[in-house]
Amino acid sequence: MPLEALDSRRLYVQIADQVATLIATGEYRPGDQLPSERDLADTLRVSRPTVREAMIALEVRGLIDIRVGVGMFVRQHASRPAAQRVSVPRHTALEVIQARLLIEPQVAALAADSVTDADLNTLGVQLGALKAAFDRGQWSAAADRAIHETVARATGNQLLADLVEGLFNDRDSAVALKFDEHLGQMPHVRDHSFDDHRKVVEALARRNADAARAAMHEHLAYVQGEMLAGWSGDSP
């Protein structure tokens, strides 16, 4: 396969551009299934999550379709020019979840000491919105974000609230949102995510800082694990 090894920091952008060129030149034709994440990672000597971000970037560009649990396929009308480059967010989806895992558990613990009844009422409404979306088989990035930002505001610390908002702003890139969309297509992820959010809210309602910290850590660690796991048709 005519792909080259890579060596700079934003590897996923280079991978996406190489594959886009192969699609434009007919190496991969409409309807073709691309090599698996594992094969691409082995060929390019990069991690599978890096390959995954590259493939999601190509999907955002309209060049491929990712069918969770099946594989990655060139679109029938993938006509965008290879010269069009992927829009590069300041931080990748995997960088954002890593930062959130370090920051948000402690934010939740602090919130448990200062959360108000009004905050809890708001969280209850937001949790209901999340469940309603999940019951429809959909992912709600808006409801998810609202819960986490309400928890941060409940600390009473504006800097922490701004920090969490900034993390979610970074998560609002097209590639990151598509990443979330694919995760949300999996029923077990939706079920686990709702249960995690419920545990966070319940811990806050008990004003139990340790439980809130643990629940938030468990939630974000689970999301990170699902982002790193194989879900495009080849086994881990």
Image (cartoon, grey):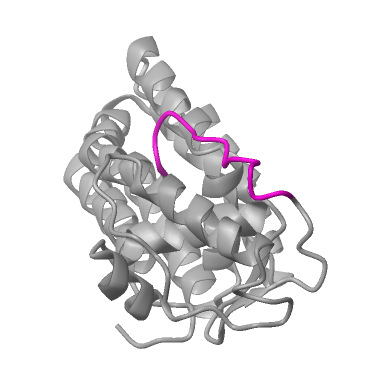
Percent of width and height locating residue 124: 57, 46
> Is residue 117 placed above or below 14 in the rendered structure?
above
Residue closer to the observer: 9 or 135:
9
Residue drawn at 42 percent across, 34 percent down: 151
Percent of width and height locating residue 70: 56, 87
Percent of width and height locating residue 16: 50, 54
Residue drawn at 37 percent across, 72 percent down: 40
- For the stretch drawn in magenta, what is the main secondary structure? loop
Residue drawn at 21 percent across, 39 percent down: 102
Give yes or no for residue 91 being in the magenta stretch. Answer: yes
Figure disc tally = 0
Give yes or no for residue 112 being in the magenta stretch. Answer: no
> Is residue 182 placed above or below 67 in the rendered structure?
above
Single out the residue that lies furthest toward the right: 77
The image quadrant that residue 160 belongs to is top left
- Residue 214 seen in the figure: yes
Is 38 positioned to the left or the right of 179 in the image? left
The quarter of the picture where the C terminus appears is bottom left
Percent of width and height locating residue 189: 47, 71
Please report the bounds of the magenta region as a residue range: 81-92
- Residue 201 seen in the figure: no
Is 78 positioned to the left or the right of 66 in the image? right
> Is residue 102 placed above or below 180 in the rendered structure?
above
Is 226 positioned to the left or the right of 149 in the image? left
Single out the residue that lies furthest toward the left: 210
Residue closer to the observer: 181 or 142:
181
The quarter of the picture where the N terminus appears is bottom left
The image quadrant that residue 90 belongs to is top left
The image quadrant that residue 159 belongs to is top left
Residue drawn at 32 percent across, 53 percent down: 220
Is 131 positioned to the left or the right of 195 in the image? right
